[in-house]
Amino acid sequence: MVDHDELFGRLAEISNRQEWDRLSEVLTDDYVEEYPQSGEVIRGLANARAVRAEYPGTLPEESFDRASVRLAAGDEKWVMTPMFTVVNVQGSGNVGTAMFRVHYPDHSTWWVVMVYELDAGKMCRSTAFFAPLFDPPEWRAAYRESP
């Protein structure tokens, strides 16, 4: 049985250390990564490595606002890395979802939701959706709670 939290913990560690040669620990050779919002499909472990290796920059760990992350999971386990905060991982069998908060080098903060499939304990396919933080509109002020 696959421990989905452990899998994403390793992925976060690999990303944190930028040890792209270790991606084979968590991704299959025929891994497919889809980004519906841009229409991109990254096919194969070699291309997944290259996309990450060519990423233009990272952020120091001290740039995180750890207090503002609300854990949305039954297990009180979460992982911190210089760019990614893994907020929630839920999986059963060979499918799951993961939610991250991402701090980009331009200092913007985005949410990423990933739907993924596993094969032999590694990710073989994922679809990621990206959403930036935004200020709430004034017209909803009367209906919302303040943090």
Image (spheres, rainbow, N blue to C red):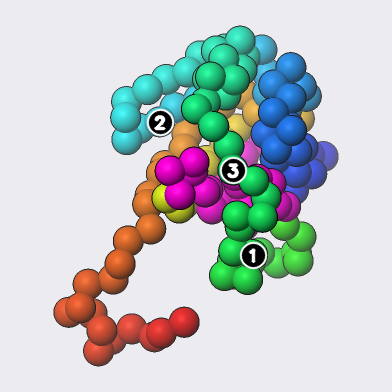
The dot on residue 120 is none
Classify the position of the N terminus by image quarter.
top right
* Circle nearer the viewer, 1 or 2: 1
Q: Quick check: is 84 in the magenta stretch?
A: yes
Q: Quadrant of residue 19?
A: top right
What range of the chain is rendered magenta?
79-107
Specify few, some or many for label 3: CA neighbours under 10 Å numbering under 14, 14-19, or 20 or more.
Answer: some
Q: Which labelled disc corresponds to residue 35?
A: 2
Q: Residue at x 46, y 37 (%)?
A: 128
State yes or no: discs 1 and 3 in contact (Cβ < 8 Å): no
Q: Is residue 66 above or below residue 15?
A: below
**How far separated are the C-alphas under marks 2 and 3?**
23 Å
Q: Nearer the viewer, residue 144 or 89?
A: 144
- Between label 1 and label 3, give the one nearer the viewer: 3
Which numbered tag is attached to residue 66? 1
What percent of the width, then of the height, locates residue 113? 49, 47
How many numbered discs, if any?
3
Residue 103 location (% of width, % of height): 52, 48
Q: Is residue 80 magenta?
A: yes
Q: CA distance from mark 1 to mark 3?
A: 14 Å
Give the amino acid type for the residue marked by disc 3 in the picture: Leu
Q: What secondary structure is the stretch in magenta mostly built from? A: strand
Q: Is residue 8 above or below residue 29?
A: below
Q: Which numbered disc, 2 or 3, marks the residue that appears first in the sequence?
A: 2
Between discs 1 and 3, the one toward the N terminus? 3
Instruction: Please state which amino acid type lies under the numbered disc 1.
Output: Arg
Q: In x, y percent, where is residue 122?
A: 72, 27
Q: First in sequence: mark 1 or mark 2? A: 2
- For the point 39% across and 85% down, the residue is 145
Residue at mark 3: 59
Label 1 SS: helix
